[in-house]
Image: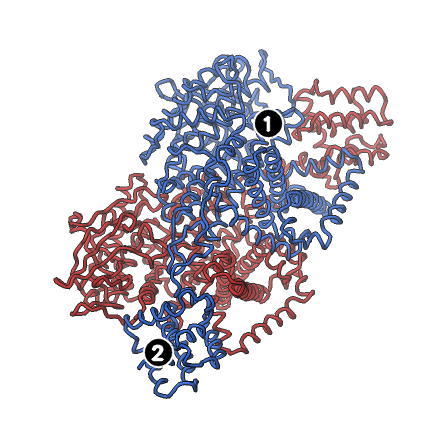
Chain colours: A red, B blue
Amino acid sequence: MENSKIKAFIPLLYLVWSDDLLTKYEFDTLKGFINSLNLISSEEKQYILSKVDISNPPSRNELAQWKLDVENSIKDKSSIKSIFDIAIALSGKDLDISSLESDFAKLENDLGVLGEELIQNFKTKSNSLTATTKTTDNFDIQKLTAILDGEQASIIKKVKEVISRPEFAYETSTDILVYRQKVYDWCKILAEENLGNMAYPKQYGGGENIADYFAVMETLSYHDLSLVIKFGVQFGLWGMSVQSLGTEKHYAKYLKDIGSLKIPGCFAMTETHHGSNVKGLETTATYSHNDKTFIIHTPHKKAQKEYIGNAAVHGQMATVFAKLIIDDHDYGVNAFVVPLRDTNGNTFNGITIGDCGHKMGLNGVDNGTIIFDNVVIPKENMLDRFASVNDKGEFESPIPSDNRRFFTMLGTLVGGRIGIPRSALSAAKSGLTIAIRYSDERRQFGPEGGSEVPILNYRMHQRRLLPHLAKTYAVHFGLQYLTSRFLKKTESEMQEIEALAAGMKSYSTWSTRDILQECREACGGKGYLSENRIDALKNDTEIYTTFEGDNTVLMQLVAKNRLSEFRKSFGEMGSLGMINYVFENARTAISEKNPIATRRTDEEHLLDSQFHLQAFQHREKTILASAANRIKKLIDSGLEAYDAFNVVQHQMIDVAQAYLERVVLEQFQVGISKVEDVKTKEILVKLNQLFALSQIEKNKAWYLEDSYMDAVKTKAIRKMVNQLCWDIRPDAVSLVNAFDIPESCLAAPIAFY
Amino acid sequence: MENSKIKAFIPLLYLVWSDDLLTKYEFDTLKGFINSLNLISSEEKQYILSKVDISNPPSRNELAQWKLDVENSIKDKSSIKSIFDIAIALSGKDLDISSLESDFAKLENDLGVLGEELIQNFKTKSNSLTATTKTTDNFDIQKLTAILDGEQASIIKKVKEVISRPEFAYETSTDILVYRQKVYDWCKILAEENLGNMAYPKQYGGGENIADYFAVMETLSYHDLSLVIKFGVQFGLWGMSVQSLGTEKHYAKYLKDIGSLKIPGCFAMTETHHGSNVKGLETTATYSHNDKTFIIHTPHKKAQKEYIGNAAVHGQMATVFAKLIIDDHDYGVNAFVVPLRDTNGNTFNGITIGDCGHKMGLNGVDNGTIIFDNVVIPKENMLDRFASVNDKGEFESPIPSDNRRFFTMLGTLVGGRIGIPRSALSAAKSGLTIAIRYSDERRQFGPEGGSEVPILNYRMHQRRLLPHLAKTYAVHFGLQYLTSRFLKKTESEMQEIEALAAGMKSYSTWSTRDILQECREACGGKGYLSENRIDALKNDTEIYTTFEGDNTVLMQLVAKNRLSEFRKSFGEMGSLGMINYVFENARTAISEKNPIATRRTDEEHLLDSQFHLQAFQHREKTILASAANRIKKLIDSGLEAYDAFNVVQHQMIDVAQAYLERVVLEQFQVGISKVEDVKTKEILVKLNQLFALSQIEKNKAWYLEDSYMDAVKTKAIRKMVNQLCWDIRPDAVSLVNAFDIPESCLAAPIAFY
């Protein structure tokens, strides 16, 4: 039996037997629908019902024929929107089923299908927006690279040349002894190229160029990160500790050989029982009046030096931090140069070295433990820039407080908190380059009948990667700013810069952690294979959030610095300060928190960089004032200060976070303002908008709680973030290519799909 | 010169030279303050000023003496709150400096110090709240363990006994060949113990107990996760594919030998070019009429099978998914048993095996690639439960649609999406046990003069770990529910259960990812050492978010299922459905969204489980309706359905998330309602409150946007989360001990500090 009436039901018949897995219940619904129709004869009804008998399915061929019929009937007809429309088209002009329209509509509802969605299944080849968006060239990549590299372009170029050489091919052995040796050999090559001593005085063979030294660290970080850390331990921690804490005699004796890697060394601060709280170190350096020596000693097993890079295998000397004891008096933590091994690698008497063994990452670095059993060193081995023992065996220092002296010493080592976040940023750039290039090529799913679509065309995939890309650009400018502040630092700025460095270290390393996690998942199974390097990038940088200061602890420090600056800013301005602050906030409230501003959702406003900066600043100030207020209240209510600070720890993280986000946004904006090339500026402005709005979106609960924004605005921001991702997508590949990472360093096969 | 007047200034003198690192600017402030005083003579002034000369610091001993003076003067005097109070105490009764009080207060401000905070520096030994909180025994751990284990207690006990044997000592070699062999040997022991065939029919030597099989997977996951995955590939994927997709002849031929590990095998579905979109697999199985065989063939390199567990070394056979071709007709993807190697491990002709090489984790599993070059297999090797080729060479199937048939086949394999999230949960439990036990012992910092404090006493540290602990308990009950739904499933529930499994797989594996990340960071450097096992836990489970279905893709599926259920629920109720829904939501709006409820912040309300569930349900329903609405609007506005779904992908994740959160909360509550022991119930109720409120806090932007809560309420919730963390902290160690993970499996030295 075949007639045009029955044809009208073909879409329904196809529907129940096709992919959408209708249940028995829905079969019954459909049967009820057919039975209820008056338009068709009882015979026709029986025929149609026989085709929806769950125990007697149609043949595969019959189903295929139905599909073909439907496809032919709707071909090129964009007006077809529902099952009913198909039914009309199939039944032809000789049957008027228009009276059934509402029945069909109800049926669509009852079956829980959306007619228009269903129709996609019948359309061949689709030119959907999703399918057609693709990578384009909208700006000059090299111009952007030049902006990123800035004044360090030539040293960056040199480092890239070195690490692209064949001898820098990655080590793939899982034997950590082999890997450690390879990393050591690489370090020697870098030393020969005069890259290690870049920051040391010219007098001792160095380059006397700290800016270049940081650029070296950053660029090396496109290569193996064990290399970067081993390099940083030798030339940064070990060498710079001598340079910062020692005096002329130490420079003359050690710096040249450290710079050439003739003396591999360690920075022995952390102990098993004291990591974050280094003030509590327990290793002792006891002065012996008789022979004018120090006796370095580990009082108990948990006071051993731990995680010390270069210790397990290669280190011959170490800067050891120990409490100086003279005549049973404790003079606080000071630094001493202690020999560990002879040039043949044999440890000296009294030195016991342990191996930290296999780690989550950085297995090319030989981290170890060191125990000192009454090791005697000559008096001149004390690094005596900030404290010394005179000929009479008396302690001397221009800084009377032991703690203050120690923190001053630590302050001179703040460079590590610039090198690490810059290294982390490079790792994020590598991860994003791999993931974005792969996502631009990898295809999966697609419109029915069309070909598969690059996964970067999916909104969710854009959401996963592109805000991170924007943030990476933002952090780049933030770290450039931190570096230049550090290079031009004056005494009175030191506290602020130390806090900024501590904060940016946390901000950048946490950012890298999140980015690489997303990159791994975005690359699916391919992201799990070691050959694609996200493994190494992720596991090597995992410890970045812990070493050079645990991020959570650092963020508390940053917040405390902000609180103290906040209190001072009142002080400096006299009691007018507080009034000004309150007034200023009130002004904000009037101009920015009026109903029009809090509900404004027009594109011009949402994309306005002034709006972004004001929103970040408002958040920073308000959170800070609120935390200060809360602490005061808690203490006033009788809580001990120590407990009060514990209660607000969670809020303190927000204080630091809001401060850092403002700095990063501001510096990204400052950076962009200097760009002259129109096209480059255009894309950076878009990235900046995406960065700003995705941060506001992340913090939107706060903005709503504060009434700075209304729900209508935060919802509009979410949509705008989606839109910006979509708009930036065609430029995404160019934007990662602008990082200009050497292909041999990138190495991941999926980045060259 | 020493008199009581000058003594009044000692706290100031100590302040400028002590730890707080005042800058030159602040020295000047202090000098100005001293100069402005009329109470002291010019000579005294000069003397004091000489002590704040930045170029002429006091000696270390003088500083120490000042400190001692201050300490003695304030000893046991809790009334001392400011620098001025100290000054009074020091200057004694013979000098009236009370007129200076406001000057001192202003100075504190100008210097940006908080007097009370400063005074902590002088107090010896503090009994602060932070220092004194500690682990206590508030409930019977074994009773809680019994609740968690439930009816599977005996099989769990058996598995723990097996994996605690000496031969299950962890493999520490970094040589993946050694590791793979060890994992294989472990699997053989488990097979001998009849743990592998637990789910197979008794007829073929199995235990016919699927509930126990899942418990085995979960308990094994306290041990090496490569073992779990290798075990799952062999007995779950390979064995269950034969059982679910094959028929009696296949059971008889293979099941016993699979269960005993006599035939190691693979599950060869994923191809390089088709992972998530398995419908698009390109491997072909072409029927040859002449000799009644299939020819299995890989048409091009990117159609090779990839990531196949057991393939690189041990697999002798594989269930291969391939498009069935008969007479040039494509009959969709079907499954075939294909021999790969002989019993000596030599691959058969036409089979080319590649090795996926080193991976981020799971290196004990031999993942490989397989290329088939016209490999001929007999007709009976087709797993023919859902489709077959008859004697005439014709295709036969009770399911006419190729896609529907394929998805039906996949549906039978849903068990994997129960085993994996349960395995992930165990890994989270291990990580939390290690991190929480360590944090209870590890001490760092402390009140001035007091001893150092366990880091778990810090609010921030509690915040990092305890909401995760609560979530882990919640997910435990959620997965118990999923399992029991699966075990009692009926045909009509299958779609819902498949969606629930897909969702819970994503929810649990993402949760584990976040938990292990936090555990790693919370353990600092120790968390980075492989010996403490967070390395392995984290890297092994990293791929859990990708395999058995990419989480992001699965969440889209879950959301689509919810949308379709949503549409149907209208249908089933007729047009009344929509009215009911709107009415119900309006009722919510009236009862829950009235100003009293949205602003209610009393403890009773915030801790009320009814409030929690209503808030979760409201969110679930509203997000779902809003997404449905948005899609409809987008399509009505002319967007193709495919594009419309792309636009809302980000929102779809929320749809799925809100649904899963509600299920998990609800099941946690149901689970608790069955607990009889009062103490056990008490602690579980607290955990449930913490889980509920920390999820609401995470989603608070949504609740604010929806006006379901007012800012005053979301702020109160934040505080309540902090408070619950503090309240649960003394029970935290007992709560992880209740997971009852064998100590030999835990293994991490820091867990036994």
Residue A273 picture location, percent across and down? 33, 51
Give above or below for A72 relative to B604. above
State the residue position of label 1.
B486
Can you give x and y, in whole percent of width and height, for residue B474 in the image?
Answer: 56, 39
Q: According to the image, label 2 marks what residue?
A: B52
The kind of secondary structure element at disc 1 is: helix
Of the numbered discs 1 and 2, the one sitting upstream in the chain is 2
* Mark 1 Cα-neighbour bin, 10 Å: few <14, some 14–19, many ≥20: many
Q: Residue at x 37, y 52 (%)?
A: A222
Q: Please give the label number shown on residue B106.
A: none
Q: Quadrant of residue B66?
A: bottom left
**In terms of depth relative to the viewer, which is nearer, B732 or A229?**
B732
Residue farthest to the bottom? B42
Lateral position of residue B285 relative to residue A412, left or right: right
Q: Are marks 1 and 2 in contact (CB under 8 Å)?
A: no
Q: Chain of mark 1?
A: B
- A255, above or below B374, in the image: below
**Considering the image in quadrants, where does the C terminus of chain A appear?**
top left
Q: Is residue B132 visible?
A: yes
Q: Label 1, label 2: how many angstroms apart (C-alpha)?
A: 77 Å
* Amino acid type, label 2: Val
Residue B81, given in percent of the width and then of the height, sits at: 47, 69
- Residue B750, picture quadrant: top left
| Mark 1 residue type | Phe
- The answer to whether residue B114 is visible is no
Answer left or right for B241 relative to A197.
Answer: right
